Amino acid sequence: MDGRTLSLSDFIGERAIAARTAERGLRLTWLLLQKARLRRYERPDGARFETEAFRDAVLKATGRNVRDVRTRFMRHVFDAAERELRYGGLVEFNDSLAVALYIARWQPLKARLIEAYGYGDGMNGVHDGLLACIRREVADPLGFQFWDNAEEAPISSAGESLATGPYYLLASAMVGDDRGVEEMDGLAKLLARWIPVGEIKNEPGAWLAVASAI
């Protein structure tokens, strides 16, 4: 049951506390996983970019209010060459979607992971294994750019969001947290077409997002 060797679906299937909830989590990530299998994060046909949908998804997942969304449409969404899209450019890391999800979700999720799998190696094995699966089946095929240390976060802020979002959804699904999955539902669907990066510096409530130009 090793996240370094098992497929994402097999890893979740073997570790899930509630099969129905786990299956729902995998269904919600299906569009994103399909993009990764094709190695192309392209705009879906008929994709809509409505501020209300963005606002609702971020609010339910993180509790953060979004006043405005500013979207950069890019040919290569995970290209970290543009400095404004890296942390410290328009968005500081502490104001990112990844940190907002951590603040809102990690402690209750950690408690459920410990309850389900035990403290120490049990919880850590699931946590590390799930991240390894996401990296192998999502991050690497889509070309996220990482620091030299493989355990560090992506250089690409969009990549960080696209790695972190599925983690919280799928970890919640594995431990049978139906409420957690429901709260991540909108963000999971949003990430298949429109990636929140975080709140723009000195502009409370204004969020930066990226989407594919093609």
Image: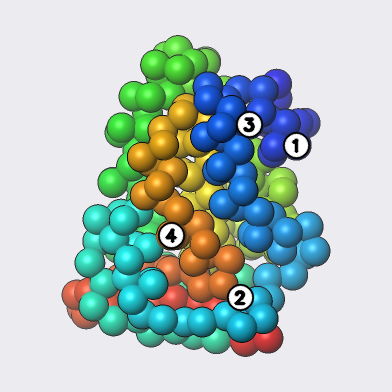
Of the image marks 4 and 2, the number of the one nearer the N terminus = 2
Crowding around mark 4 (Cα neighbors within 10 Å: few <14, some 14 to 19, many 20+) is: many
Kind of residue at badge 3: Ile
Of the image marks 4 and 3, the number of the one nearer the N terminus = 3
Distance between mark 4 and mark 2 Cα atoms: 20 Å
Residue found at the far front of this picture: 20
Q: Nearer the viewer, mark 4 or mark 2?
A: 4
Of the image marks 2 and 3, the number of the one nearer the N terminus = 3
Distance between mark 2 and mark 3 Cα atoms: 28 Å
Of the image marks 1 and 3, the number of the one nearer the N terminus = 1
Residue 12 badge: 3
Pointer 4 residue: 186
Kind of residue at badge 1: Ser
Kind of residue at badge 4: Gly
Distance between mark 1 and mark 3 Cα atoms: 9 Å
Q: Nearer the viewer, mark 4 or mark 1?
A: 4
Crowding around mark 3 (Cα neighbors within 10 Å: few <14, some 14 to 19, many 20+) is: many
Q: Residue at x 66, y 54 (%)?
A: 30
Residue 193: which quarter of the image? bottom right
Indicate left or right for 34 with 146 as reference.
Answer: right
Q: Nearer the viewer, mark 2 or mark 1?
A: 1
**Do we see residue 80 in this rendering?**
no
Dot 3: what SS?
helix
User: How far across and how far down the image is residue 162, in percent?
Assistant: 54, 59
User: How far across and how far down the image is residue 29, in percent?
Assistant: 60, 52
Residue 77 badge: 2
Taking depth in this image into account, of 212 and 136 the one nearest to the observer is 212
Dot 1: what SS?
loop
Question: In this picture, is 16 found above or below 46?
Answer: above
In the rendered image, the quadrant that contains the C terminus is: bottom right
Q: Residue at x 55, y 43 (%)?
A: 25
User: How far across and how far down the image is residue 161, in percent?
Assistant: 48, 60
